[in-house]
Image (cartoon, helix red, strand yellow):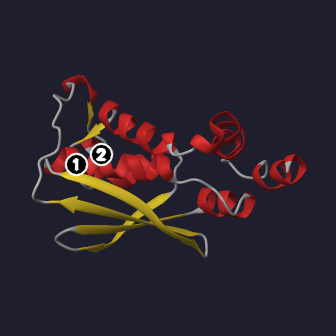
């Protein structure tokens, strides 16, 4: 995999991301790759987004791809993740893991709504990753006190 990996990913601006996400981290976590879901949730508590519109900006700045909400219903929200980094990662591995992104989405939406949420990757087809976020309106999220210092305003310059 090393030569193929290098040939495909080194030609993009996302080499460091793909190197970590699709080579090193899977080697370290082995069968425990699901830990990335919880890592994504932790990142969402460390980088709190109060505005829904900030999600796509954060994903772009984090190098996670282009995030777009494609469907919003009462109890579910469907997102698509695409772009060069997604294309590269899917080209490198049929088993590319997008649980970090799913965990981040679940926790961010939970923080914004105050209800428990869960996210699952439902498909990885045609260079697009689809993530479904389920919202449990009958429960209330374990709303830990979020650090005020962790709230970031990615739209600050646009609001002025």
Q: Residue 87: x and y, percent? A: 64, 64
Q: What element carries label 1?
A: helix
Q: Residue 147: x and y, percent? A: 21, 25
Q: Residue 43: x and y, percent? A: 39, 35
Against 63, residue 142 (above or below) is above
Q: Tell me the crowding category of disc 1: few under 14, some 14 to 19, or many 20 or more residues within 10 angstroms, Cα based.
A: many
| Horizontal side, residue 102 vs residue 51: left or right | right
Q: Tell me the residue that label 1 is attached to.
A: 110
Q: Tell me the crowding category of disc 2: few under 14, some 14 to 19, or many 20 or more residues within 10 angstroms, Cα based.
A: many
Quadrant assignment, res 91: bottom right
Residue at image point 63% right, 56% down: 96
Is any atom of residue 160 visible in this view? no
Residue at image point 51% right, 45% down: 34
Q: Residue 145: x and y, percent? A: 16, 28
Distance between the Cα atoms at labels 2 and 1? 5 Å
Quadrant assignment, res 15: top right
Q: Do the residues labelled 2 and 1 touch (CB within 8 Å)?
A: yes
| Horizontal side, residue 1 vs residue 141: left or right | right
Image quarter hosting the C terminus: top left
Can you name the residue that lies furthest to the front here?
A: 31
Q: What element carries label 2?
A: helix
Residue at image point 25% right, 54% down: 117
Is any atom of residue 23 visible in this view? yes
Against 5, residue 148 (above or below) is above
Q: Tell me the residue that label 2 is attached to.
A: 107
């Amino acid at each position: 995999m090393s030569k193929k990996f290098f040939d495909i990913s080194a030609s993009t601006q996302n080499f460091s991301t793909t190197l970590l996400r699709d080579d090193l981290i899977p080697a370290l976590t082995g069968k425990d790759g699901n830990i990335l879901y919880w890592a994504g949730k932790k990142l969402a508590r460390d980088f709190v987004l109060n505005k829904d519109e900030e999600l796509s900006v954060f994903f772009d700045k984090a190098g996670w791809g282009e995030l777009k909400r494609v469907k919003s219903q009462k109890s579910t929200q469907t997102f698509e993740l695409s772009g060069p980094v997604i294309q590269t990662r899917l080209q490198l591995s049929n088993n590319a893991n997008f649980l970090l992104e799913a965990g981040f989405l679940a926790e961010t939406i939970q923080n914004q709504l105050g209800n428990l949420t869960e996210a699952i990757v439902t498909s990885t087809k045609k260079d697009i990753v689809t993530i479904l976020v389920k919202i449990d309106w009958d429960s209330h999220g374990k709303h830990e006190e979020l650090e005020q210092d962790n709230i970031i305003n990615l739209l600050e310059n646009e609001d002025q």
